[in-house]
Amino acid sequence: VAAISHAAGDPLSNPVPLAIAASLERGATHPIARAVINTAAGLEGLPEVTVSGFKVVAGAGVEGFVRGFGSDGPARLARFGSVEWAAEIAGGPERAAAIRLRVAERSSEGHITAVLVVQDAAEAAA
């Protein structure tokens, strides 16, 4: 894995997901982490994201509480990793199913290795 691609094509069409994923992957050494970090390093204008409570979940991905990226609200749980695992925080079974469906649809266009899910601000405040 040398680089990542954004679902919309241009990573800067919405730089927030890449900034969050790169912040979560900072310090990791696996190939996906390196690809995310290398992609982010080559771009200017990514919003600043701070991560607390970082942890690696073996075989699933990474997670942490993220802040920044233009939001003054509470820290929000973010997961970057396998679709099934990341979708668990999507806000209920319907939203998780919608994420899995969207990834399945996009997978037919190319191979999706990982997905980023960030908890809704309302759920993070609860």
Image (cartoon, helix red, strand yellow):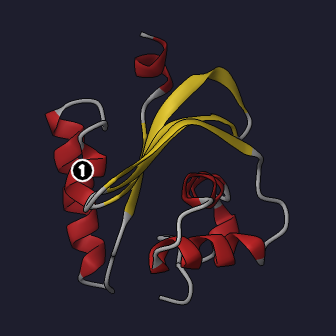
Q: Secondary structure at mark 1?
A: helix
Task: Look at 23% across and 71% down and name the residue there.
Answer: 105
Task: Look at 16% across and 48% down and name the residue there.
Answer: 97
Splitting the image into 4 quarters, where does residue 11 fall? bottom right
- Farthest residue to the bottom: give it: 2
Give the side of residue 4 with respect to residue 92, left or right: right
Task: Look at 77% across and 78% down and name the residue there.
Answer: 42
Out of 57 and 88, give the one closest to the viewer.
57
Which image quarter is the C terminus in?
A: top left
Task: Look at 33% across and 76% down and name the residue there.
Answer: 112
Q: Position of residue 90 (x, y in %)?
A: 31, 38
- Badge 1 is on which residue? 85
**Is residue 5 positioned above or below 91 on the image?**
below
- Farthest residue to the right: give it: 44
Specify few, some or many for label 1: CA neighbours under 10 Å numbering under 14, 14-19, or 20 or more.
some
Q: Position of residue 101 (x, y in %)?
A: 19, 59
- Farthest residue to the top: give it: 126
Q: Position of residue 70 (x, y in %)?
A: 74, 36
Out of 19 and 23, give the one closest to the viewer.
23
Give the side of residue 96 with respect to residue 1, left or right: left
Give the side of residue 119 with respect to residue 38, left or right: left
Out of 79 and 90, give the one closest to the viewer.
79
Splitting the image into 4 quarters, where does residue 95 fall? top left
Q: Amino acid at mark 1?
A: Trp
Splitting the image into 4 quarters, where does residue 39 fall? bottom right
Q: Position of residue 35 (x, y in %)?
A: 56, 79
